[in-house]
Amino acid sequence: MRKRNIYSIISLWCVLFFCPTLHAERKGFAVVIDSISYQQAQHELAEYIRALESKQHFKVYTVVDRWGVPDSIRATLKGLHARPHEAIIGAVFIGDIPIPMIRDAQHLCSAFKMSQKMPWQESSVPSDRYYDDFSLQFDFLKRDSTAPYYYYSLSARGSQQVHLDLFSGRIRPTDGDMPGSRYTKLKAYLQKATEAKLHPERMMSVFVYTGSGSLSESKTAHIDEMASMHAHFPSLAHRPNAYRYMDYSDEKLIKQKLMNALMSPDLSVAFMHHHGDYDTQYLSAWPKPSTAEEAREYLLHCYRSSLNRARHFGYDTDSIRRNLQSRDQLPDAWMAELDDSALAKDDSLESAMTNIVLSDFARYAFRPNCRVAFWDACYNGSWHRENCIANEYIFQPGKTICGLGGSVNVLQDKWPDRFAGLLEQGVMIGFLNQLNPDLEMHVVGDPTFAFLPEQDHSLNDLISSGKQKDWKRLLRHSLHPDIQALALHQLQESKELSDQHLLEYLKTSPYESVRLEAFLLLQQRHSDDFVSAIENAADDNFELLQRFAVNALIKNGDPRLANTLAGKLCDVNTSARVAFNALQGTQFFSRQNLLPAVEDRLRQVAPYVVQPETYAKGVLKNAENYAGRWNEEIEKLCKGEMSHKRIRAQTCFDTNQFHANLLPALPLAPSSRLCRHAKRRRTAVTVARGFGMAPPGLYFGTGSPRSGKTHERHFPLGTSAPRSSENLQTIEITLIEQET
């Protein structure tokens, strides 16, 4: 109790100190809505806007899109953001706002890598970074003939890093199987979002679910994540049953148990780690067998699944059956069961119980109540489709208001709960995405949603317009780890926050989120101290920071880090993911640097392992098999000696796994051998983009899909400027016909 009182006193002192900031000019916010949705939900929209103005003190600009062209909307938002007074800091896109589909930008995604020879709808990234990141430059390609998609190529003329100027969110109801129902859904959702503003709640509980394959099923990672939840949300400590956890292995069929947990009326935030698709949350694998009979059923299920897939794609199932029987010596009785239609139906029913699909919301009357959802899964946030998992969550009658999800596949090996603790401090969900952006990540729902803060730090005002002195005070005096981490993030360009300061926070901070933030900032700065940062972080007590350090070690490739890598390879209790990444990292270290370090470390641990010779033999075998595996490939690329066919095969790999210390050797000048050919020039840019570099004098245009020629194309924005009247609430967007 004494500690809590001290915390409150310090927080109150901070508020008093920030009084000048609290009376700053109100911020603007844009509500962008299509004309039909505007007509259909005019009353509900007016109430929503009134709540934005009265409860969150926004100056709201209603932008009615009457033309459905992204260029016009982007220009309007850019103009509102540049206003000298009451400039917008965020936007929400409501209804049928045109959807930008971005190409040539996969280096800005956390995981998405797909050949752009695939159909454009699948190989492009649906992204509102077109609207909210003005540093990115785009070239118009075409409009889709069957969907409200506008295709753009990311231009090399602009930034090659995502840095949002605005936070944003999507509220896009669709009809589904009920024509005209989108407007009913929209009105109901706006009423729900308005009610959340008029009667805000404090955070009451947090829930974490981990599905099969999530976080590599590392128990260490799961333990650390729950520990971080306690650090993120310290105010929940005195509330009963406030921290909740569920793993797919808790029950054979976890689906209904998870649904019940998500429908809990007092659930504030849900983090869901699993695999996914736009229409499916893949919760668990086929239950693991525990008896001989269950093992038999499991094998037969696998065989039946293989035959069903073969049948689906038109393969000869008879020859596959014969091969299976011969290869695995299956008895005739088993073979008879492979074609049993009743068993196949049972397989289908049991498989259905392992996942949440779109039809389950109606079938089970599934009404999620988590106010905020984090879908750490591929495609669950595909708001551009006619329906998706994220949309079902927010448009159900339950209390889910918004969430964060990816429009394409997402990397699970990242920091999914970065700054999550700011939610209990009343920070809007849109800011969380703005602070940690990717091309594919979006707020689905109202981006201005916020919980009632535990202590009024006025963090929303500080994030949008705080001065460095404000963040310095918070860094020194705040007891909340996420506020400290945020302060470091906001001070990252301050000259007073040196690399040495960050390294000291990494070494000494008691908070995992602060240490991890310091590490990431050192990485972004390309600091001379980064080798020391990796050496310290690789042995940190926080598994996620260990993993980030090993991944950074791989890309850094400094020979001095061979000893650190050897330590992770020889550690007898390295977590599953760290051990996997360390083994992968041996590919990028030369044998002459790595193998002696491994041998030396093995001599050190020999007295403390059983059968040291056998243990050392296994470690050395892995190191010898992988060490220096790609040296020759990278050298050929740098020298311009690699064939174009091989370059294309290696582009994605080299972009993700490339030694930073080799980048200066990459000849990116237009006259170089590597860049002389247009196709090789494109590859060189791709590699450079992966490191946030746009080489001067190196540019390729959008190109014509038919001719294959590379050339520049320019498309004027062609929009009218917003009217200057201060009390104007509706901006009509007019569009000058585009040059074609």
Image (cartoon, helix red, strand yellow):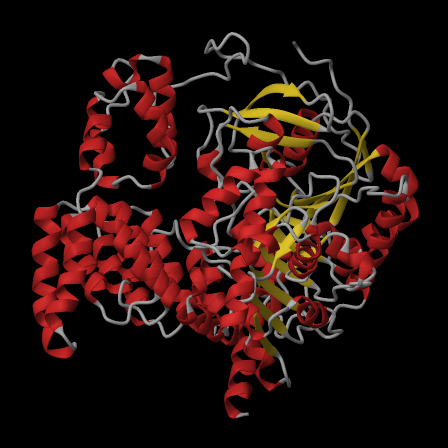
Q: Quadrant of residue 223?
A: bottom left
- Image coordinates of residue 373 in percent, x first then y, are 65, 60
- Image coordinates of residue 393 in percent, x first then y, are 73, 56
From the viewer's side, name the closer residue of 667 and 738. 667
- Image coordinates of residue 190 in percent, x first then y, are 83, 53
Q: Is residue 211 visible?
A: no
From the viewer's side, name the closer residue of 738 and 469. 738
The total number of labels drawn is 0
User: Residue at horizontal 52%, vertical 47%?
Assistant: 410
Check the image and report above or below for 69 versus 507. Answer: above
From the viewer's side, name the closer residue of 588 and 338. 338
- Image coordinates of residue 526 in percent, x first then y, are 29, 46
Classify residue 262 as left or right of residue 33.
left
Query: Where is the N terminus found, in terms of image quarters?
Result: bottom right
Classify residue 672 as left or right of residue 645.
left
Classify residue 422 as left or right of residue 552.
right
User: In the image as oriented, which residue stretches furthest toward the front?
Assistant: 332
User: Residue at horizontal 80%, vertical 63%?
Assistant: 364
User: Residue at horizontal 70%, vertical 55%?
Assistant: 345
Query: Where is the C terminus found, in terms of image quarters?
Result: top right
User: Residue at horizontal 51%, vertical 38%?
Assistant: 319
Q: Is residue 337 visible?
A: yes
Check the image and report above or below for 537 versus 204. Answer: above
Classify residue 276 as left or right of residue 556.
right
